[in-house]
Amino acid sequence: MSTIEDVARLAGLSRTTVSRVINNHPYVSEDKKKRVKFAMNTLGFVPNSAARRLRKQRTETVAVLVPRVTNPFFSRLIESLEIFASDHKYKLIICQTRYLPEKELEYLELLSTKQVDGIILCSLQNKWSIVEPYLQHGPIVMCNEYTDEAHIPMVKFNQAEGAYVATKHLLEQGHRRLLFCSGSDKSSMIVQHRKKGFLHAVSEHKEQVDSVEFVEDAYDMEDGCRVFRDLLDTKENPTAIFAGGDEVAAGIILEAKRHQWSIPEQLAVIGFDNQLLSEIMEPTITTVCQPVDQMAKKVIELMMEKIRTKTYKKQEVYEFELELMIKGSTVKHTTVLA
Amino acid sequence: MSTIEDVARLAGLSRTTVSRVINNHPYVSEDKKKRVKFAMNTLGFVPNSAARRLRKQRTETVAVLVPRVTNPFFSRLIESLEIFASDHKYKLIICQTRYLPEKELEYLELLSTKQVDGIILCSLQNKWSIVEPYLQHGPIVMCNEYTDEAHIPMVKFNQAEGAYVATKHLLEQGHRRLLFCSGSDKSSMIVQHRKKGFLHAVSEHKEQVDSVEFVEDAYDMEDGCRVFRDLLDTKENPTAIFAGGDEVAAGIILEAKRHQWSIPEQLAVIGFDNQLLSEIMEPTITTVCQPVDQMAKKVIELMMEKIRTKTYKKQEVYEFELELMIKGSTVKHTTVLA
DNA sequence: CTGTTAGCGCCTTCAG
DNA sequence: CTGAAGGCGCTAACAG
């Protein structure tokens, strides 16, 4: 492996001049530039990034912390983040916390050990007060997740409004008994915001609503199936369910069909995230569409800016709107116009 | 940010001793070890990884090149790779080539610029002769994809056998007209191997088979739908389809149902990869299950070994067996025993 | 067991 | 426009 020194020697010039050519500095004569380039090519020289990092105190790498990459929401997010980062010549280190606080801390060390210039947090497993100190080593940008205490840039969706619109849609179909079905609201503000939107819609129709129930341990399709079975044990079961994800919604619908229920006549179900799944189920699932690309773009822009300006401790919140996609699981086919 | 120098000064010792403590070297008295640790804690010292990389010529990072992370097969693979890499304290840089040769080359530069210790290639967009030279900078391990020319470690599935068993299953159901439906066999050996297995099964039943057709531009669900529609134009359409992926199979089935065909009675379909999708379709899709975890484990082990031993240019092929999962899209429900 | 010293490869003042 | 020299932070001989 050749170094800048070798190139300089072969070109009969100084290391400085070679370095200038590498970094496109002005003030190098065309003649010498050519000699340097020739020498670089013959030696197959490539600048050593470790040396560069040490010298420039910059890695051109950012870490992305997600719970799991197989969750379609996160893999879609990573896809976008990677593309936008790549536009800035930045690389992404993907880290799966698997919902474990200790894993999250382990990966936050990437910042203090200067392996990355910044961290994009797509979930938060520790209390913010534990994460906060890492800010002294570089920027942290929160993506999708949210927490009041953090004085950093945060990019999120307007979950409350999304849930509000979705719930209103259910209420406008005349439903009187509702179920709000999600993951735990302990660990994530996202659930809390959705619940707020849900309750807001309910309160606006309180004369119409007979009952409101909550399930807060539903994460995947299997959970959805269970939720439906539990329903059967109650005498006055809900007629409309707001589910925190398309997988859960799909599970509910799948199990309902196994029990010969017809959707949406006997039970209306609404999902979240407009995944492929919501298109292929029968009926298709009414869902809330999240503009992931826009969020990813903003996150990368912010990260680049923070790395440049080195001001990490300012709270800035950017919010993107969600869109309700009305499909077959809440409205009968015959009423949908072609 | 404090350096090893600061720690040494505060502890009243040399940088060497501090370094020894950091790296768990033997021959440091308990007393001094304590003093060093105390100093490290009070200063909040963390070793700078750039300096370490420069000194040790090792990054503890590996790049993984995939076409897209949203493809469920690849996101599942990445999940596994990340977990096993993490066991060895290795980080993963995820790179999406988006099927572009130039992107692949761009990311291969991570190896020559010493940003990573090795590269895991999960697809191959360039001719091997173009990739080969990068081997002088570090190990490349091929994962899932395969190419004869490469003298490197390759971990793959036995695609030929998988396709053979799947096709045989179709033939045993008495089908006489088959369609092999996949992506292009130009860019990937995987399709070629599957086709070989398919033809092998066909040749074993040649007195039974009336016709064999091929479609080689089907990649996703949309393509699957199209494939079915094209079928309608032929007078003697196939009664069984071997599809190169569960998405394609799902598309075919979806479109068939829209045309009131009954599956598997009028058309049997077999997918690949045993994705969630194959479970939730109605009927469920007979598919070929790939042991991704095993492959990922082997790939990481090999990578660690190559990084250690620095012998990159030896061809070693490791193959894992595939398993046919018989479900509803090839065999009538009533004939399946509980 | 501990310290001294010499770089790893690069960029960037500073002085021509 | 060009070069000399110092140092980013760390580790690994080599001496003691």
Image (cartoon, coloured by chain):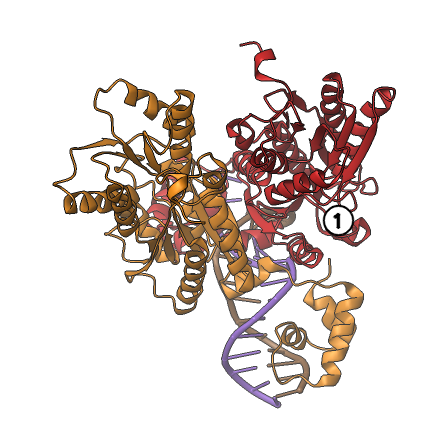
Chain colours: A red, B orange, C brown, D purple
* Position of B213 relative to B144 (above/below): above
Q: Going by the image, does B303 lie left or right of B47?
A: left
What's the residue at 46%, 45% (across, down)?
B74
* Most distant residue in the top direction: A337
Secondary-structure class at tag 1: helix
What's the residue at 80%, 67% (across, down)?
B42
Q: Position of residue A40 (x, y in %)?
A: 37, 47
Please state the chain letter of the residue tagged with numbered disc 1 in the rendered image. Answer: A
Q: Nearer the viewer, residue B285 or B145?
A: B285
Q: Is residue A317 visible?
A: no
* Position of B257 relative to B16 (above/below): above
In the rendered image, which quarter is residue B222 located in? top left
Quarter of the picture containing the N terminus of chain B is: bottom right
Q: Is residue A24 visible?
A: yes
Q: Position of residue B142 (x, y in %)?
A: 36, 53
Residue at mark 1 = A135
Q: Going by the image, does B128 lie left or right of A110?
A: left
Q: Position of residue B8 (x, y in %)?
A: 72, 72
What's the residue at 42%, 30% (across, down)?
B221
* Position of B252 relative to C8 (above/below): above
Q: Residues within 10 Å of mark 1 (few under 14, many from 20)?
A: some
Q: Nearer the viewer, residue B185 or A283?
A: A283
In the rendered image, which quarter is residue B274 located in? top left
* Most distant residue in the left direction: B207
Q: Position of residue A299 (x, y in %)?
A: 65, 35
Q: Name the residue type under label 1.
A: Leu
Q: Nearer the viewer, residue B304 or A67?
A: A67
Number of numbered markers: 1
